[in-house]
Image (cartoon, rainbow, N blue to C red):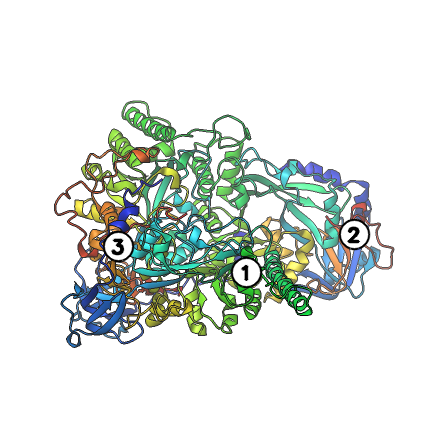
């Protein structure tokens, strides 16, 4: 998993980043959301070498004087959104069709740092994402952390293991074709690891999952799939995150009991009411959840959830802190606390009001979309001009 | 697939028959007249095919010449009346869409097992019409399920024309347009005919045509039924597959004398139906499920109950297989869903009789009506009740004790009887019941316990 | 999610069920396997039956009384061969034709509409088996028809191994000729013979491995084979779906050949082979006695259902259970019992055939299937005689809790 650090470092020394490393930036705005529970009014944050160095009154006067001042005036600054699971629409590359069970495949190896979709994401507020194997395999593989925005995206650490009980994992012309077949496949694999029969790289991944050192994201939508996923999580001690989970309200007590989390799909106004109210119910029950699905509609999902009863703080949390935590990266992503990556998004107002416009997105202390105050906007990446995917 | 049931079709022919000139007395049973009060220990006298007396046993003197059927401990009811059926025909859906000149008289198969079953289940009057898949399908007729030829079976002819809004090849709107066009064509034809006739008369009056010449053109034979329909001389029986077609059906029923034959999924249209002059005909499947889009919960609906609640009069249909082929199941389904028992029974007796214009003939046990009755082993709404005897126009048309098909169905096979392979059904010996029942296993059918044969694709 | 534990709000998992006592009085009680009680009393405490008896049965102080005069109470019905309970396709694992170790329970969808329909019609437990598209489909289970968590709904796991005779397991398989070459349907069996061959091979290998394992070298573990060995050892009952006479004979023959115990499921032609069934001492599941024809994917198998079959089995002393089975034309289970009664089965026996008889067959009679003190409070309050076509289940209770009715 550490193998990829050199690559990340290589990216960091690219000339594009060099300028950021050279000089501190003093970020100022009417309102800076350091974390959903820590909001600075007329605040300032000092960014150094792509990270948050000081917050608010902690900023030393001497550093303040030397820093390049970036004042967004009346705008809102929020931590960059974290997308806990996405295939960026490239399911074909992220689901091995011939085999149902490929836990040791790595999404990092399918990630194309030059992929144009990645350039789009900052405009929608997304600064970090987990590129995950798609839902077509019962065990898909290992997701990779990707930071978006720059011309060449940074493909980083390996993250969680993805499993899938969703319909398209059992529709191909290969076994399993049924839910019970899929469940049995996983159960026997985990059993094999437990009894020591299972060996090899795939068993190693499963062992990490059973030991809790690697999270497990399971694609599951309906009642039966969710129950099956929760059963597996219970029986093998998995740190479970359910992806999709359209009918999660039916298994709410089990989610609480097993401390499972949920990555929701895109919320759309035409969905069942139960699905629109799900975020609010999860929040009340204390189930960690984040918004997922179409990266371009993250804000819309959050705004809809607010309209259906979710409090704004939880909604913002579900875009930033919770997904960062689900990726075990809440020490570096999802907030603007000291030591966190300097990933943030600037909106003209509250990001949960869809009337607020996007102003700018910074990743690792570098402006990657939008504009600096008083400056001409950064040249739009060519893909952005071509329109959204 | 199924083993053929030899002699099945012959069952009717074997039933004993008495000349209808005789006097028939059914005595001792509980007489459910339907139209009047129920009479315990009653007597029904039938002379020359008509009911002449219905009264308490104590109040009637049974003529000594009468053939007497003792119905003590049993229930005597009018035979059921089915106002709309397409079963019992060989091919009831003509592929050509506009064929009003056809008649079911040419399609009815007197040997169809469906008729045999209908009789076995106490049905005495059936209005047979073309199927639901033909735009303008032809004329129907009323029959009784008894007789070797269609003429034997006939009760009334030219009982109306079948129309259908069921979309076949093309969408719903196209079907509506086609039906409008077809009716408009007939109207134009009539107008043209009338114009030519008027011209003829004018010219004759003007002397251009000899006075002794008469107008001898007649309505085109292939159009006569349709012309009768648009001139409201004949009734139309319009199949309405769902609530979506109901608006058009109601519009048409303003112009024509229509009875609506409803499909199953009609609940949204119930309020519209309250405006109709005639009772509606219900689909044989009375219950169906609807899923709520939001909650995904299912809801069970019963068309009879919906209409009863809305105050819309209706008649029941009898299916051509499965439980809906049993009148007791249809009535039980109504009552189970909260329809008043008497109303349910009327929907299979007096209401369809009136709808068919046969209220003075069938549908109730009353003096002056046809001598049609059934004798049941018990309550007509019980599953364990069986029809013992059916009397049609004073003649015994069915007796359960002599029903060869029931015997065949209930006989225990010989222990070593080899089952013929699926292919050579014809090779099976037609012996119905040579096996003496291994005692007491099948000494007949205790507790009314016999099975009746359901049609094995009989009338198709 | 340990890192997020601090975010979690403590959540009470349902309050403990108060030991509330409810008494149902005045009903005619058909306890299942026992004589009817004309003016009966049913006492329910904490999800279990505390007492059943006549009007003299003592009513505990403070109990809630439900007046059931004119009603009939029966045990909750048990459908010993139930089609549904999972999404279409989820009960047929098409990856292989012999999958003895797969468990239908893993595919259970508590939200399946078929379960809701069954429960509204008085069915409180169903035997859920893998589908009929495999030669050896896998393990069946008994679940209650209400609940959200399969583990909580489960009455008994691994009660049966489903084996299927006839044309269904081979229906969509293809010989290597034409079509897509990467299809998993390129495989045996494609004939009835092939179906039998697959069954025999599976059991033969299991038997051989069993015999080997008694010697020095243990065979490598194989979960499918272990299930078959449980059947061979008599620890698990096979449920062989066999509709036509030919298939029933085959099912009996293979069971005799390998010496395992089987139940004949969907035995439509049982009336033809009554002697063989009697001699083999097997229980017969009679699917949909109301139907005159086998409808659904097994329609082509040539079985010829007869109305008199149930009565014949009763008269000959062949144990039978009435089910809805695989026939797509099947009615609600209680109506199937009603049709059996219409066709000559004594009413009490017809009710037993959907309550205590399936409970005994499935080995769950200690918990459900009849009304007796100590059993789960699974029962139905019918508007009147349940064998009347106009009867409705006014309330259905599972573990003492009324489940929402659908009317």
Instruction: Please give the chain letter of the residue carrying mark 1.
Output: B
Q: Which residue is mark 2?
A: A369
Q: Residue furthest top?
A: C216
Name the quadrant of the N terminus of chain B. Answer: top left
Q: Is residue B244 left or right of residue C389?
A: right
Q: Are marks 1 and 3 on the same chain?
A: no
Above or below for B139 versus C190? below
Task: Measure the C-alpha gap from mark 2 to mark 3.
Answer: 69 Å
Between B412 and B35, the one nearer to me in the picture:
B35
Tell me where residue A353 appears, x and y as whole percent.
70, 65
Give the label on residue C355, or none.
Answer: 3
Camera sees residue B458: yes
Camera sees residue A283: no
Between A22 and A100, the one nearer to me in the picture:
A100
Which is in the foreground here, disc 2 or disc 3? 3
Above or below for A226 versus B415? below
Tell me where residue C102 appears, x and y as whole percent.
40, 39
Asked where in the image residue C338 lies, by quadrant, the reply is bottom left
Give the label on residue B226, or none.
Answer: 1
Q: SS class of the residue under badge 2?
A: strand
Which is in the foreground here, disc 1 or disc 3? 1
Q: Is residue B20 left or right of residue A175?
A: left
Asked where in the image residue C376 lies, by quadrant, the reply is bottom left
């Amino acid at each position: 998993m550490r193998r990829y650090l050199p690559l990340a470092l290589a990216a960091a020394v690219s000339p594009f980043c060099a300028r950021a490393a050279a000089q501190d930036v003093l970020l100022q705005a009417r309102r800076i959301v350091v974390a959903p529970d820590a909001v600075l009014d007329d605040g300032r944050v000092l960014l150094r070498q792509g990270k948050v160095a000081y917050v608010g009154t902690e900023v030393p006067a001497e550093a303040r004087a030397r820093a390049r001042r970036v004042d967004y005036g009346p705008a809102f600054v929020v931590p960059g959104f974290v997308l806990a699971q996405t295939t960026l629409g490239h399911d074909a590359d992220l689901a091995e069709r011939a085999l149902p069970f490929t836990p040791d495949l790595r999404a990092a190896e399918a990630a194309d740092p030059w992929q144009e979709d990645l350039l789009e994401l900052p405009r929608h507020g997304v600064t970090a994402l987990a590129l995950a194997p798609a839902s077509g395999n019962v065990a898909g593989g290992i997701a990779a952390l990707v930071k978006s925005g720059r011309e060449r995206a940074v493909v980083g650490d390996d993250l969680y293991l993805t499993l899938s009980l969703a319909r398209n994992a059992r529709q191909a012309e290969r076994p399993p074709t049924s839910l019970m077949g899929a469940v049995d496949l996983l159960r026997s694999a985990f059993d094999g690891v437990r009894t020591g029969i299972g060996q090899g790289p795939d068993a190693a991944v499963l062992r990490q999952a059973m030991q809790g050192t690697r999270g497990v994201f399971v694609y599951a939508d309906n009642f039966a799939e969710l129950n099956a996923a929760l059963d597996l999580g219970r029986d093998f001690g998995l740190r479970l995150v359910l992806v999709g989970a359209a009918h999660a309200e039916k298994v709410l007590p089990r989610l609480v009991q097993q401390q499972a989390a949920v990555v929701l799909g895109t919320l759309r106004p035409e969905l069942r009411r139960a699905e629109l109210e799900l975020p609010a119910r999860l929040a009340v029950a204390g189930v960690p959840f984040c918004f997922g699905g179409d990266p371009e509609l993250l804000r819309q999902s959050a705004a809809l959830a607010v309209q259906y009863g979710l409090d704004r703080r939880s909604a913002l949390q579900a875009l930033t802190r919770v997904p960062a935590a689900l990726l075990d990266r809440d020490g570096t992503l999802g907030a603007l606390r000291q030591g966190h990556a300097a990933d943030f998004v600037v909106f003209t107002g509250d990001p949960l009001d869809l009337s607020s416009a996007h102003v700018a997105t910074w990743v690792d202390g570098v402006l990657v979309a939008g504009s600096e105050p008083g400056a001409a906007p950064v040249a739009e990446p060519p893909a952005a001009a071509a329109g959204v995917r | 697939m199924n083993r053929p049931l030899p002699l099945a079709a012959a069952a009717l022919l074997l039933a004993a028959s008495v000349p209808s000139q005789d006097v028939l007395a059914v005595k001792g049973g509980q007489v459910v007249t339907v139209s009047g009060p129920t009479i315990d220990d009653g007597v029904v006298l039938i002379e020359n095919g008509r009911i002449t007396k219905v009264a308490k046993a104590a109040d009637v003197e049974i003529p000594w010449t009468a053939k007497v059927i003792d119905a003590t401990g049993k229930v005597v009811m009018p035979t059921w009346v089915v106002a709309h059926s397409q079963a019992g025909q060989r091919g009831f859906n003509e592929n050509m869409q506009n064929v009003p000149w056809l008649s079911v008289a040419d399609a009815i198969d007197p040997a169809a097992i469906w008729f045999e079953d209908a009789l076995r289940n106490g049905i005495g009057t059936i209005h047979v019409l073309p199927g639901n898949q033909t735009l303008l399908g032809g004329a129907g007729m009323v029959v009784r399920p008894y007789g070797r030829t269609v003429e034997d079976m006939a009760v009334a002819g030219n009982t109306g024309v079948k129309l259908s809004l069921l979309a076949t090849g093309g969408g719903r709107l196209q079907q509506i347009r086609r039906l409008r066009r077809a009716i408009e064509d007939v109207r134009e034809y009539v107008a043209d005919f009338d114009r030519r006739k008027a011209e003829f008369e004018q010219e004759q009056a003007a002397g251009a045509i000899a006075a002794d010449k008469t107008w001898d053109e007649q309505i085109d034979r292939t159009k006569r039924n349709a012309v009768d329909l648009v001139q409201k001389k004949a009734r139309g029986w319009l199949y309405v597959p769902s609530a979506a077609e109901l608006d058009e059906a109601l519009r048409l029923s303003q112009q024509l004398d229509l009875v609506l034959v409803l499909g199953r999924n009609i609940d949204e249209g119930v309020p519209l139906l309250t405006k109709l002059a005639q009772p509606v005909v219900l689909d044989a499947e009375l219950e169906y499920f609807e899923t709520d889009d939001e909650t995904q919960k299912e809801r069970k609906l019963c068309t009879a109950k919906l209409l009863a609640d809305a105050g819309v009069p209706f008649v029941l249909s009898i299916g051509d297989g499965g439980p809906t082929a049993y009148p007791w199941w249809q009535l039980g389904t109504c009552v189970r869903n909260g329809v008043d028992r008497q109303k349910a029974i009327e929907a299979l007796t007096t209401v369809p009789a009136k709808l068919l214009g046969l209220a003075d003939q069938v549908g109730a046990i009353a003096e002056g009506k046809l001598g049609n009755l059934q004798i049941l082993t018990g309550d007509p709404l019980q599953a364990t009740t069986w029809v013992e005897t059916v009397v049609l126009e004073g003649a015994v048309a069915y007796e359960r004790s002599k029903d060869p098909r029931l015997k065949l169905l209930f006989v225990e096979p010989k222990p070593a009887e080899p089952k013929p392979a699926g292919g050579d059904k014809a090779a099976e010996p037609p012996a119905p019941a040579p096996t003496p029942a291994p005692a007491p296993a099948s000494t007949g059918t205790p507790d009314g316990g016999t099975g009746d044969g359901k049609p094995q694709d009989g009338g198709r | 999610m340990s890192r997020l534990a601090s975010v979690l709000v403590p959540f009470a998992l349902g309050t403990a069920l108060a030991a509330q006592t409810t008494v149902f009085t005045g009903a005619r009680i058909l306890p299942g396997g026992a004589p009817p009680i004309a003016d009966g009393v049913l006492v329910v405490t904490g999800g279990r039956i505390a007492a059943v008896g006549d009007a003299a049965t003592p009513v505990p102080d403070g109990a809630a009384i439900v007046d059931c005069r004119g009603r009939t109470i029966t045990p909750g019905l048990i459908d010993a061969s139930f089609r549904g309970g999972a999404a279409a396709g989820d009960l047929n694992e098409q990856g292989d034709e012999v999958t003895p170790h797969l468990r239908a329970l893993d595919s259970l969808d508590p939200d399946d509409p078929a379960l809701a329909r069954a429960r509204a019609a008085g069915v409180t437990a169903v035997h859920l088996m893998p589908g009929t598209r495999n030669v050896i489909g896998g393990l069946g289970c008994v679940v209650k028809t209400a609940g959200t968590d399969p583990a909580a709904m489960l009455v008994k796991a691994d009660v049966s191994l489903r084996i299927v005779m006839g044309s269904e397991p081979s229906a969509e398989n293809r010989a290597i000729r034409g079509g897509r070459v990467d299809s998993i349907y390129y495989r045996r069996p494609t004939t009835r013979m092939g179906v039998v061959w697959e069954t025999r091979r599976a059991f033969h290998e299991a038997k051989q491995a069993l015999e080997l394992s008694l010697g020095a070298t243990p065979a490598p573990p194989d979960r499918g084979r272990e299930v078959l060995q449980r059947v061979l050892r008599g620890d698990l009952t096979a449920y062989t779906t066999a509709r036509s006479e030919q298939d029933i004979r085959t099912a009996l023959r293979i069971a005799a050949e390998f010496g395992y115990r089987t139940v004949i499921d969907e035995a439509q032609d049982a009336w033809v082979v009554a002697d063989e069934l009697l001699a083999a001492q097997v229980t017969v599941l009679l699917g949909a006695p109301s139907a005159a024809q086998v409808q659904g994917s097994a329609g082509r198998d040539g079985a010829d259902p007869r109305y008199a079959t149930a009565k014949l089995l009763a008269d000959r002393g062949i144990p039978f259970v009435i089910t809805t089975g695989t026939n797509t034309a099947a009615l609600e289970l209680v109506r199937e019992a009603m049709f059996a009664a219409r066709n000559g089965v004594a009413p009490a026996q017809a009710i037993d055939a959907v309550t205590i008889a399936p409970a005994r067959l499935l080995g769950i009679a200690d918990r459900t299937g009849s009304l007796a003190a100590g059993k789960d409070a699974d029962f139905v309050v019918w508007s009147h005689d349940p064998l009347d076509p106009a009867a409705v289940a006014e309330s259905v209770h599972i573990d003492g809790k009324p489940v929402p009715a659908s009317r």
